[in-house]
Amino acid sequence: MVYEVIQPVSGPSIFQKCLDKHNDTPEIYHIAYDMNGIPFVDRIKEFEKRAFTMSQGGSWMSKNHFAFFETGDVTGTCFETYEFPNDWDYPETEEWFPHPPGENA
């Protein structure tokens, strides 16, 4: 399981929009998942077929494709789908919080 913490720093974003809408009340903004090899384009088409609008999408490091869909009215949260290619390597970690794995504080 992977946990992702996102904090808007500046400028408009879907994350800041959510914070503004809920008056900075903590909540789970989105659920992210892979789709077991279903082509990314087919995922997009399936969400659109179900009338869900993509609110944000792109590629991280030109390889990891992602898309957020506004599913909140139906599910109570936003859904994100992503695709890590088979040759994906994570970049080096810039910072660990509270400390690197295996190291006691």
Image (cartoon, rainbow, N blue to C red):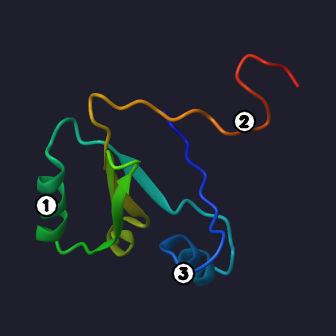
Cβ atoms at labels 2 and 1 below 8 Å apart: no
Q: x, y (%) of residue 89? A: 41, 30
Q: Is residue 45 above or below residue 103?
A: below
Graded by Cα atoms within 10 Å as few (under 14), some (14 to 19) or many (20 or more), the crowding at tag 2 reads: few
CA distance for labels 2 and 1: 37 Å
The 10 Å Cα crowd at callout 3, few under 14, some 14 to 19, many 20 or more, is: few
Q: Residue at x 32, y 70 (%)?
A: 74
Q: Could you tell me if residue 68 is visible in this image? A: no
Q: Assign the C terminus to one quadrant of the image.
A: top right
Q: What amino acid is found at the position of numbered circle 3 in the picture?
A: Pro
* 94 shown above or below 103: below
Nearer the viewer's eye, disc 2 or disc 1? 2
Whichever of callouts 3 and 1 sits on the residue coming sooner in the sequence is 3
Q: Which mark is residue 12?
A: 3
- Between 66 and 81, the residue placed more toward the observer is 66
> Where does residue 10 sit, x and y in percent of width and height?
64, 75
Provide the residue designation for mark 2: 96
Element under label 3?
Answer: loop
With 103 as the anchor, is 36 left or right in this view?
left
Q: Measure the alpha-carbon separation of dots 3 and 2.
A: 27 Å
Disc number at residue 46? 1
Residue type beneath disc 2: Trp
Q: Earlier in the sequence, mark 2 or mark 1?
A: 1
Q: Secondary structure at mark 1?
A: helix
Q: What's the residue type where badge 1 is placed?
A: Glu
Residue 93 x, y percent position in the rendering: 62, 35
The answer to whether residue 64 is seen in the rendering is yes
Q: Residue furthest right?
A: 105
